Amino acid sequence: MIFVSCKHEPEEIVIIDPVIPIDTVPTGLTCDPDTVYFRNDVLPLLISSCGMSGCHDASTAQEGVILTSYQSVMGTAEIIPGNPGRSKLYEAITDGETDERMPPPPMSALSADQILMIRKWIEQGARNNYCDAICDTTSFTFSGAVMPIINKNCKGCHTGINASGSIRLEDYATVKAAADNGSLYGAVSHQQGYSPMPKNGTKLPECNIIQLRRWIENGSPND
């Protein structure tokens, strides 16, 4: 995701020094369904859709924007806590012009639910918050567990004709193909011979890896 289309000449962006809120969420807090958590919800999506090589990782930093940690997001993406309408990040992902929308084509735009999640996080103060999400390893249906994991952590890099590694993870058919050839589990479990995923170097929570493994072992059903 970039704030200026790659086909235009770079424009100078004035970075506003944000007031970074103090994280007041205690360790071990159970997730509140009405709260959006940066480390649980927002950061995985930003890394998958934006914080990659060629866009907004620390090495590339298109237009000076880095979206791989709380400090870099708040320091470069012009987030105004409580005010998504004045936040550059939110403006970029809601731009109505096809040639200006972010992520840019041929990457898929963020979904309405993903945009709403980022808006809600900003409205709630853009905190560096997190919670201990409940994860049930006995639940591994495609719609209830597998695709939500893919959407949050993988789909941004693995969609469209330029999908990373030519591996597309867009729907049941493409996810099952990756499961059948071993690349899905090999990547998320960081097995030798596979490029470890997610690309930021942090493995998925062990519970999520178990859910994916059990879904695959169960024949990768579409239920």
Image (tube, helix red, strand yellow):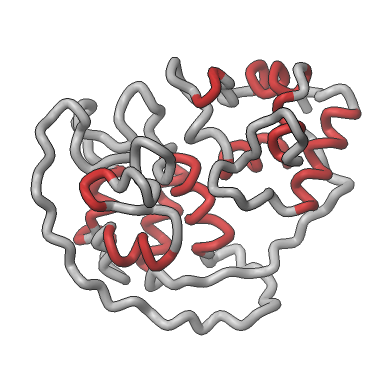
**Residue at 39% over, 27% down:** 107
Where's residue 61, x and y in %? 30, 47
Where's residue 135, x and y in %? 77, 56
Front-most of residues 149 and 73: 73
In the picture, the quarter occupied by the C terminus is top right
Quick check: 52 above or below 21?
above
**Residue at 55% over, 65% down:** 34
Quick check: 137 above or below 22?
above
Which quadrant would residue 101 be assigned to in this image?
top left
**Residue at 77% over, 44% down:** 209
Where's residue 106, x and y in %? 35, 22
Residue 95 horizontal side relative to residue 36, left or right: left
Task: Report the number of discs.
Answer: 0
Where's residue 124, x and y in %? 41, 70
Front-most of residues 6 and 78: 6
Residue 40 horizontal side relative to residue 60, left or right: right
In the picture, the quarter occupied by the N terminus is top left
**Residue at 75% over, 47% down:** 208
